[in-house]
Amino acid sequence: MHHSKKLINSVEHCVDDALNGLVAWNVGMQLVEGYRIVVRSDLDNIKGKVAVLSGGGSGHEPTHAGYVGAGMLSGCIAGDVFTSPPTGNISAAIRAMARAGAAGVLLIFNNYTGDQLNFGLALEEMKIERISVEMITVGDDCAFTTQRKTGRRGLCGAILMLKIAGAMSEMGMSLDEIVLKLKSTLSKVGTLGICLSPCSVPGSKPTFNLEMDELELGMGIHGEIGIERIKIMSADEIIQKMIDHMTNPTNESHLRIQAGDHIVLIVNNLGGLSCLELNIVAGSAIKYLESKQVFIERAYVGSYTTSLEMGGTSLSMMHVDPELLKLLDMPTSAPGWANVSRRNLVRKCRTLSVPHLEPDHRDTPPGSGPFVDKVRSILDMVCTTLLQMEEELNELDREAGDGDCGSTHVRAAHAIKNLLASDAIPGYGHQILLCLGRLIRDHMGGTSGALYSIALMAAAPNVKNNNKPSAWALALDSAIGALKRYGGAEPGDRTMLDALCAAADELRKVSDEDGNELKVLAEAVQKAKAGSEATKDMIAKAGRASYISSAQLTRPDPGAVACAAILKCILTALEGSNPEDQA
């Protein structure tokens, strides 16, 4: 495999460019010239307080530089991608803090050999310079079931330590107090990751390869091996497997969690998981923990410690008491720390139940009489015709759209058939139009469903107190007006309007006195048919077809064809009923 695409200027400068960019958009931080060190802009506020420093390889953003800010890190030292920062930079950062008047410096970093060596060496150097420095190493990985000599890897749980230390420093606590607190808290946190797809260091091939149908459990944040590869399964199953492994007492690096425990949860995106999946994972984890009677005091969901573009997630859990919660809830200006609600999730009501959001239409009594009989025969014919035309309309739509125009119309036909079977046809024109509008809105779907509903709803008021032919002609005009307004199309754009407008122009000639309505309607149906045929030579300017080059469009528009067919059904049904009746 070749190395993956990256949006960078150059491999050798990508870390510096990223740090420059981060500092460019965050008022609260600045770079120390000549070093890869990011420090708070308000160094005056460090005077007399403990400076909290962290650092490590880059590629885990927002870890660590994204956590620089009031209430979190005083500064951070960045290494190359996935590479520990050199000792000289760490020492320089400590000296910068001492020069700003810090009352001691605390180094917090993840348990990796390179970081241990470089931070340890810097600490020894500082002792010689008589600067008061302490270090805390975080190892929160719950993957390996047997102890390793090197100890547990540091993963996303470390950011909780940075937050606690930063809050204590802000409160003016001493170096010893902070160290004591962190040491007692380290054993309360655990993290486990899973990986679906690898990442690649800028300029290199992916660090490993995973098959399409497998995921790795217990992956490290640099692509280090996990504990097992398993076949992909549902999110719920994966999350349960993760939490079971993390809390399994036979696993030497497990985190003890039992019913009644109070925890905070981090659902961390390792970099390449979509936000949609992350929310699914969060829901899954919360549901499973709650089913075990665990109290989730806070849930932090987002990208906290990433691994470039690795597709995957990690779950971190930490036991908390009111004191720790207070420290986690204290404000910070660090951009990487999400502004999470300071209330727990326990017994939170998650659904709003609101009966009767739909207006009640059942109060329309079914009508009877010659008018309703006509409506019934029209609708019956429309259904039959649309069912017959399904394949033809789908075929036309495959050329211009997504090939479902016929199926969409069939859904409408079935809904209307159910209405006919239920004997619930109202007795007035405007109620019939509203009833059809709602029916189509709820059952047809697609763009056509919305367009027909809008047209029917707009048409209805015209025939509220007037059932004369001219009122129905006006109703069609109102329908067309609404279609133009919301659909953004005009006649000539190759849409259903090309059939409807042609018919409407003809229908304006109807007069209520001389009973010419069937003759005019017959003429209008002819015009609609011609209008729909003419669309085959038009360039689509609206609707989905407008994204397709006109050279590929050689047949009429399915929407126009359907509208012409519906108008013809109306005519045929009306001709079939008593010709002496007023339409």
Image: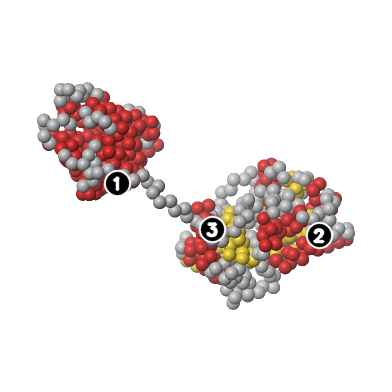
Cα separation, mark 2 vs mark 3, equals 38 Å
Type of amino acid at the residue the image marks with label 3? Lys
Instruction: Compare residues 552 and 539 and report the one nearer the observer.
Output: 539
Side (left or right) of 368 relative to 302: left
Q: Position of residue 393 (x, y in %)?
A: 26, 42
Type of amino acid at the residue the image marks with label 2? Ser
* Residue 186, placed above or below residue 80: below
N-terminal of the two: label 1 or label 2?
Answer: 2
Type of amino acid at the residue the image marks with label 1? Arg
Could you tell me which residue is drawn at 51 percent across and 63 percent down?
287
Q: Are marks 3 and 1 in contact (CB under 8 Å)?
A: no
Could you tell me which residue is drawn at 50 percent across and 56 percent down?
350
List the residue tagged with mark 3. Answer: 348
Residue 33: image tag:
none
List the residue tagged with mark 2. Answer: 174
N-terminal of the two: label 2 or label 3?
Answer: 2
* Label 1 crowd bin: few (<14), some (14–19), many (20+), radius 10 Å: few
Side (left or right) of 255 relative to 136: left
Residue 362: image tag:
1
Q: Position of residue 208 (x, y in %)?
A: 56, 61
Side (left or right) of 268 relative to 463: right
